[in-house]
């Protein structure tokens, strides 16, 4: 998506994990919640996203943000100030069993941050990253107990965000089953010419 629309992507989870690795105050606070599969407080999520936005101009793709109504409202204010309102919200839908299955097979590269599925994209857990050669590891919250907490948080806090964007005509529901290529093709079809990136702020 980043390549297609020439727009940098930012994953809120990656930003928070980088804060934890750097030992910042935001990271310490974030870790207290992430270690239990809970969302971090809005103030923490917003602080990390706000500093990322301040350092980037033009179009962008956010991944995993906003995840609460409070974050969605605060993001509207931030983007209005920047004069770059959202053009679309992609809601990737997948049955719980398939989410569990993907999480149980996910490995993440310590060097470039890309994710891979064992069995399809890499053959074993001992392999190096096929893109950069970095070490592939399992995320500390990718286990069934933590996933159950994360799904609970999703139902309670994130599901309502869907209505918020539906009411504003921004929501695009995407069937996230199948291969990455198939999902991307659906995203491209659902957004098509509706996405315009001549943002100048
Ligand atoms: P992810 O990498 O998107 O799966 O996120 C991993 C964890 O980071 C989540 O379980 C939350 O603890 C935290 N996190 C990521 N994004 C947010 C957000 N927008 N708001 C609150 N917590 C978040």
Image (cartoon, rainbow, N blue to C red):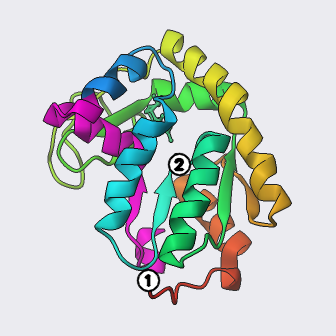
Q: Is residue 73 visible?
A: yes
Q: What is the span of residues highlighted in magenta in the rendered image?
A: 1-27
Measured from the top left, where is residue 143 in percent x and y?
45, 16
Question: At x 48% / y 78%, what residue is drawn?
Answer: 5
If you read the primary sequence from the N terminus, does the residue marked by circle 1 or circle 2 appear first? 2
Up-down: is 109 above or below 86? above
Residue 26 belongs to magenta span? yes
Question: At x 34% / y 34%, what residue is drawn?
Answer: 107
Query: Viewer-proximal residue, 51 or 120?
Result: 51
Measured from the top left, where is residue 41 in percent x and y?
48, 30
Marks 1/2: CA distance? 20 Å
Give the numbered dot on residue 201.
Answer: 1
Q: Main secondary structure of the magenta part?
A: helix
Residue at which label 2 appears: 65
Secondary structure state at the residue bearing disc 2:
loop
Measured from the top left, where is residue 185 in percent x and y?
63, 68
Residue 106 occupies quadrant: top left
Left or right of 63: which side holds 134?
A: left
Give the numbered dot on residue 83.
Answer: none
Residue 17 belongs to magenta span? yes
Q: Nearer the viewer, mark 1 or mark 2?
A: 1
Question: At x 68% / y 74%, what residue is drawn?
Answer: 191
């Amino acid at each position: 998506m980043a390549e297609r629309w020439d727009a940098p992507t930012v994953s809120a989870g990656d930003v928070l994990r980088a804060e934890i690795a750097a030992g910042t105050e935001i990271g310490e606070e974030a870790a207290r919640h992430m270690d239990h599969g809970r969302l971090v407080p809005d103030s923490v999520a917003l602080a990390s996203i706000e500093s990322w936005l301040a350092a980037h101009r033009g179009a962008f793709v956010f991944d995993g943000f906003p995840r609460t109504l409070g974050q969605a409202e605060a993001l509207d204010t931030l983007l209005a100030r920047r004069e770059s309102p959202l053009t679309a919200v992609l809601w990737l839908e997948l049955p719980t069993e398939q989410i569990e299955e993907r999480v149980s097979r996910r490995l993440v590269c310590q060097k470039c941050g890309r994710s891979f599925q064992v069995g399809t994209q890499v053959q074993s857990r001992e392999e190096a990253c096929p893109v950069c050669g970095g070490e592939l590891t399992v995320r500390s919250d990718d286990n069934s107990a933590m996933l159950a907490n994360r799904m609970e948080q999703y139902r309670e806090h994130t599901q309502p965000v869907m209505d918020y964007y539906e009411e504003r005509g921004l929501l695009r529901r995407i069937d996230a089953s199948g291969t990455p290529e198939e999902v991307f093709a659906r995203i491209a079809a659902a957004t098509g010419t509706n996405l315009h990136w001549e943002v100048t702020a």
